[in-house]
Structure formats: structure tokens, C-alpha cells
């Protein structure tokens, strides 16, 4: 860490929970972000600002006019560009010392697993259950911490899963019914979302990621629910499901 780094990250280094050692961990970390939309944009911006050394951005979509209401890494002139390319430009303007790797195609199976084997944490910033379940399976297989966020209408949800640590549950322990998956996917695109909500949840995903990377995460898995209309938070402890098809005793992984 050089003098410029000490100055740039001074406000974090001042914190006892981070200090120079924690900041060095961030600089040496790699974070995979799946989905560079309403959640992925603020999460990536804050992780770059915090000094996470390498960000791997994965999204096959292009910037659309309708994205600009909530996807704050993009500008009007970015319309038509791949989201990962437009985001890379903004992130490196914010912090040129961060390495940004862009993946503008969908990654599945062995290819996704290979990417996660080199990542210190993964962020689920997608908007559909099939992608969430697939990323969860690969994170369990590679023991990669998974920071999951969701935002719809005025409602948000946040959870941190640490497979292989503290007898952690996985995303499939929370949503085990595949019938729920299919019915939710049919209505997802028909629901709106208020502009600032993904910024709140995405920023909290970045915060939880920083905690994971610096060894400050909580051992108990909690699901946080946010109601943007009432500004109320609710918390629920989640335990590992021993019969979970992904992380349970008899899982195929």
C-alpha cells in the first residue's frame, strides 16, 4: 500500500474493524458481481470506491432508456452499450487502481464454477430465480460467500450466505420450493420498483461484502426485509436445512 492508497482509504483505515490489515485484504480481493442493474450498479461503485482490488462484472444486457431510472452507473449516452462496458468506464474513472474484468455473456455450470473458484465473494444482483439458484449452487460447490439482494416495488431483501462456514444455510434453504420459483418468474417483469430502493439494497450488499472480506461478518445467517413505505426493517434468523437439495446432507454437490 503506497502513500496515495493511505490517503484515498484513510477514512476506512481509521476504523478499528478494518485498519491497514483490513484495507490490504480489500486490495487483494476479487469479487464477482452477477447482474449490473439496479443492485449491481451501486454495489460495484461502492466496492470500487472502497478499494476492492478486482471486480468481475457479469451481465449480457445492454443499457436501455428504462434502466436509467435506477441503474446509477449509466448515463444517457451509454444507451446501447453493454452494461459491463459502461460500468467499467465509470468504475475506473472513480478508482483507476481497481481492476475491472467484464463478462458480457451468460456464465453457467463449469464455466461459472471456475470463475467463482478465484473469487473471494460473489454478489447476486440478478432479478430472476433461475439465476439465483444457479449462482447459489456454484457458490456452495466452491465455498464462496454469497451476498444476495433483491428489490421490488417498495420492498427489499438482503442475506449473506457463507457456505462451509458456521454451518451456514444457502439460498435454497430459504427458497426450497421450485414451484415458487416458476410462479415468481412469471410475474417478475410486471412489477415496478421505486428508483432509490435498489440503491439502498445494493449499497448494503457492498457493506456486507466489505465485512466478509475483512473478517467482520456475523456468524448467524440473517435475512433482512426492508419496507420502503414504512421505513421499517425486519430480521429473521435462518438455519441450515439438513434436507436442502443443494447444501443438505444428501445433496448431490
Image (tube, helix red, strand yellow):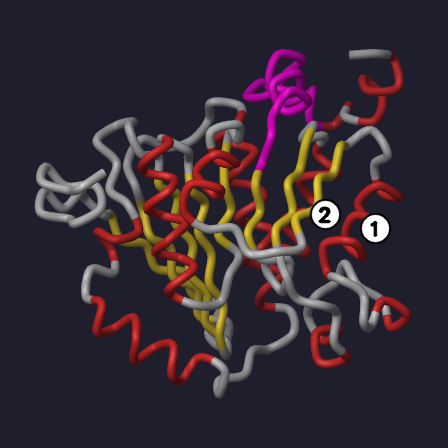
Contact? badges 2 and 1 (CB < 8 Å): yes
The mark tally for this picture is 2
Q: Residue furthest bottom?
A: 190
Q: Name the residue under label 2.
A: 45
Horizontal arrangement in the rendering, residue 166 relative to residue 190 (left or right): left
Residue at (25%, 53%) from the top-left corner?
172
Q: Quadrant of residue 18?
A: top right
Which residue is pictured at 41% across the width and 33% down the height? Answer: 144
The residue range painted magenta reads 12-31
Find residue 197 and report its horizontal and vertical position in percent. Answer: 58, 68
Instruction: Please identify the residue farthest to the front as the structure is shown.
Output: 110
Residue sitting at x 66%, y 66%: 61
Residue 123 location (% of width, % of height)? 51, 46
Residue 126 position in % (x across, y down): 51, 61
Is residue 11 positioned above or below 179 on the image?
Answer: above
Q: Where is residue 4 in the image (x, y as percent from the top left)?
A: 88, 19
* Mark earlier in primary sequence (2, 1): 2
Q: Distance between the residues labelled 2 and 1?
A: 8 Å
> In which quarter of the view is residue 83 placed?
bottom right
Please state which of the two labelled residues, at mark 2 or mark 1, is closer to the viewer. 1
Element class at badge 2: helix
Magenta region includes residue 151: no
- Residue 126 left/right relative to 170: right
Q: Name the residue under label 1.
A: 90
Tag 1 secondary structure = helix
Amino acid at each position: 500500500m503506497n502513500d496515495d492508497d493511505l490517503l484515498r482509504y484513510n477514512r476506512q483505515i481509521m476504523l478499528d474493524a478494518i485498519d491497514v490489515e483490513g484495507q490490504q485484504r480489500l486490495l487483494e480481493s476479487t469479487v464477482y458481481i452477477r447482474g449490473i442493474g439496479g443492485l449491481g450498479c451501486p454495489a460495484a461503485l461502492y466496492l470500487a470506491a472502497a478499494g476492492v482490488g478486482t471486480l468481475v462484472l457479469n451481465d449480457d444486457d445492454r443499457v436501455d432508456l428504462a434502466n436509467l431510472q435506477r441503474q446509477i452507473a449509466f448515463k444517457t449516452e451509454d444507451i446501447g452499450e453493454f452494461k459491463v462496458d459502461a460500468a467499467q468506464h465509470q468504475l475506473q474513472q472513480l478508482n483507476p487502481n481497481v481492476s475491472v474484468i467484464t463478462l458480457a455473456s451468460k456464465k453457467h455450470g463449469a464455466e461459472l464454477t471456475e470463475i467463482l473458484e478465484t473469487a473471494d465473494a460473489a454478489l447476486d444482483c440478478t432479478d430472476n430465480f433461475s439465476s439465483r439458484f444457479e449462482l447459489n449452487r456454484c457458490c456452495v460447490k466452491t465455498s464462496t460467500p454469497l451476498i444476495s439482494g433483491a428489490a421490488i416495488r417498495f420492498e427489499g431483501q438482503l442475506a449473506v450466505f457463507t457456505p462451509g462456514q458456521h454451518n451456514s444455510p444457502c439460498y435454497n434453504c430459504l427458497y426450497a420450493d421450485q414451484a415458487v420459483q416458476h410462479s415468481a418468474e412469471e410475474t417478475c417483469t410486471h412489477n415496478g420498483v421505486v428508483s432509490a430502493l435498489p440503491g439502498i439494497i445494493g449499497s448494503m450488499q457492498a457493506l456486507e461484502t466489505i465485512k466478509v472480506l475483512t473478517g467482520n461478518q456475523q456468524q448467524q445467517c440473517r435475512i433482512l426485509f426492508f419496507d420502503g413505505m414504512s421505513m421499517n426493517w425486519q430480521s429473521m434468523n435462518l438455519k441450515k436445512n439438513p434436507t436442502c437439495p443443494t447444501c443438505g446432507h444428501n445433496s448431490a454437490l
